[in-house]
Amino acid sequence: MKRSLLLLAACTALLLFEGCASLGPLPSPFRRTPPRPGRTSLGSQLVIVPTKALGNFLIVEAKGDRFGPYHFLVDTGSSVTLVTPALAKRYASKDAPPADAPRVRVLSADGQTTELAPTTLRQLELGKARFDDVFALVYDCTALSAHLGVKIDGILGFPLFRETLLTLDYPRARVLLQSTRSLAAIPGTAIPLHDASKTPLISVRLGERTFVALIDSGSDAPLSLNPIGLNPAFASAPRAGATVGTLTGERPQQIGRLAETLTIGDHHLARPIVDLTDELSALGGEILKKFSVTFDQEHDRVYFHRDTHDTIVAPPRRSAGVSFNKTPAYWRIAGVVPGSPADAAEIKLGDLVTHLNGEPVAKWDLNRYEQLLTTAQQVSFRLLEGVHEKVKDVPVFELVP
């Protein structure tokens, strides 16, 4: 995203629609306390925000005018809220920065920077919760909307919820908001937050070694691990995976399975799948979806809760060996896993997919395609070649056993 603020925004790097489509960690900002909303009002002691689970993401619905409702991705890895140009224009505060205000520089996951215009929204309503005078950056969510199959109007950063208890209840596909003065007991294991600037960084363990990781609901990846200093042992060696899209470009993924146990509080994940990175290590949605996670920013702690303490075991990662840039009319091949059946079938970068298993790609949303890959033995791709179409049947394989 943009940098003049240090915004740890995870949600603008997407792992293009792949075997398990993914969004990867995004930007990294300058160290400065992120802005909080001018005022937060809750209409009841417990606000249950209308929510939909898409892949490993939680999408919330906001009240709107005749143009709404609006949909937002909750991104605890982002230190700022992002909104589309249309929403920024429609809800601009009278004190919003002028159009010629200096842009904010943001660092993307690939180390490149880009610039976004600042704005202030007069208000944002999520169920019975209202946030006034919300600082945001203006970002085009068209690609993200196409990826998820639903119109996304913005990305809600972690500081927006500074004055609430925020619960991301993945198992029940709910987002809950409570007052920080609530006397209700918070279920789960309490883990201190590390960062005084209110970034959700916690200590986790790999075997007997402790390292710091970002809690990043804006990424649907598993554990994104910077291996420097950890020297991790692998049960399945890292290999080329999907293509990761960022704010400023694309990069190849390196994915494997660790041979050790990841421990979060008193919860254990045996031999987790890992996406290697040279950025900050992070817990993405593929891990978070096993938990209900409550953030208490006022007291600098987070709670991880499951109904059981059984060890979590990640199943094999299955893939068709291709990544896509997704549009309603076609999916453009953005990456082919080297040595995969798709590679052997001579599927090329830039090829256009019009049908999957005989149906137009417009009928395949994120959840349906992911479900297909968990069970199918092969996927039938109809590719557009000039004015002609050609069908290629591609076996589904275990990218990570």
Image: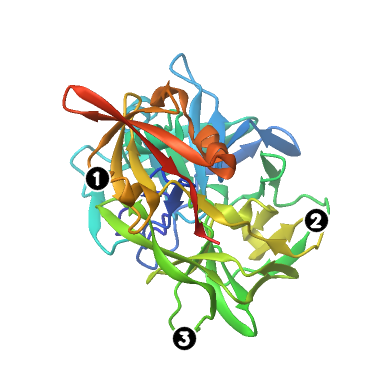
Mark nearer the N terminus (1 vs 2): 2
Residues marked 1 and 2 touching at CB (< 8 Å): no
Q: Is residue 182 left or right of residue 59?
A: right
Toward which corner of the image does residue 302 lie, by quadrant?
bottom right
- Number of numbered discs overlaid on the protein picture: 3
Toward which corner of the image does residue 300 lie, by quadrant?
bottom right
Toward which corner of the image does residue 362 lie, by quadrant?
top left
1 vs 2, front mark: 1
Residue 86 image point, x, y percent: 33, 27
- On residue 348, which mark appears? 1
Residue 95 visible here: no
Which residue is the site of mark 3?
A: 229
Residue depicted at 32% across the width and 51% down the height: 343
Q: Is residue 310 left or right of residue 290?
A: right
CA–CA distance in space, label 1 to label 2: 49 Å
Residue 88 visible here: yes
Residue 395 image point, x, y percent: 45, 45
